[in-house]
């Protein structure tokens, strides 16, 4: 079994019985982060913001991963006006999907 390339488990090895130690990382992103204010159109919709920023709505979990003290609930805490930290996508990864 292998995880999808857009999964947070993509770099984690799997043997025949279980998932091995978690190895975070995704070559779609740089090590840089930036602050972002959640706009009204993304109120309680992390999937829409993930799609806008990264071209994939399944990457909504990144917001939870980078903001564990701000976003306790992935939907209800994702509200307009809140400032969160987001990873910066590598330009080449975005260009390849377009």
Image: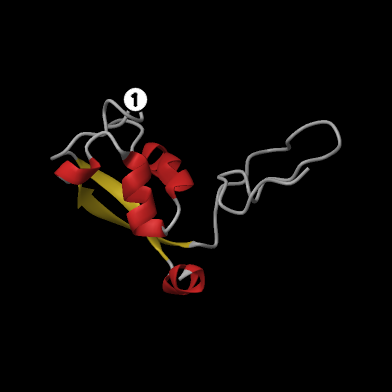
- How many numbered tags mark residues here? 1
Can you say whether 85 is above or below 21 in the image?
below
Question: Is the N terminus in the top left, top right, bottom left or bottom right quadrant?
Answer: top right
Which element carries disc 1, helix, strand or loop?
loop
Q: Is residue 40 shown above or below 6?
A: above
Q: Residue at x 22, y 51 (%)?
A: 36
User: In this orientation, does residue 49 appear?
Assistant: yes
Looking at the picture, does residue 26 appear above or below residue 38? below
Q: What color scheme is it?
A: secondary structure
Q: Nearer the viewer, residue 78 or 98?
A: 98
Q: Nearer the viewer, residue 97 or 31?
A: 97
Q: Residue at position x 38%, y 52% from top?
A: 51
Which residue lies most toward the right here? Answer: 16
User: Who's the residue at 15% across and 42% down the image?
Assistant: 40
* Left or right of residue 35: residue 40: left
**Of the pair 67 and 7, the residue shown nearer to us:** 7
Number of residues whose C-alpha sits closer than 10 Å to that of mark 1, classed few (under 14), some (14–19) or many (20 or more): few
**Residue depicted at x 17% and y 38%:** 82
Residue 98 on image: x %, y % = 45, 71
Give the quarter of the image for residue 38.
top left
Residue 15 percent location from the top left of the image: 82, 40
Please say whether residue 38 is visible from this viewpoint: no
The quarter of the picture where residue 71 lies is top left
Q: Position of residue 72 (x, y in %)?
A: 33, 25
Residue 43: x %, y % from top left: 22, 37
Residue 74 placement, left or right of 43: right
Query: For mark 1, what is the residue?
Result: 73
């Amino acid at each position: 079994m292998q995880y999808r390339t857009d999964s947070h488990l993509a770099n984690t090895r799997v043997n025949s019985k279980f998932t091995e130690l978690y190895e975070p990382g995704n070559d779609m992103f740089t090590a840089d982060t930036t602050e972002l204010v959640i706009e009204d159109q993304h109120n309680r919709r992390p999937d829409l913001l993930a799609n806008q920023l990264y071209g994939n709505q399944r990457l909504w979990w990144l917001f939870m991963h980078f903001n564990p003290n701000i976003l306790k609930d992935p939907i209800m805490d994702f509200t307009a006006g809140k400032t969160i930290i987001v990873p910066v996508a590598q330009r080449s990864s975005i260009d390849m999907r377009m």
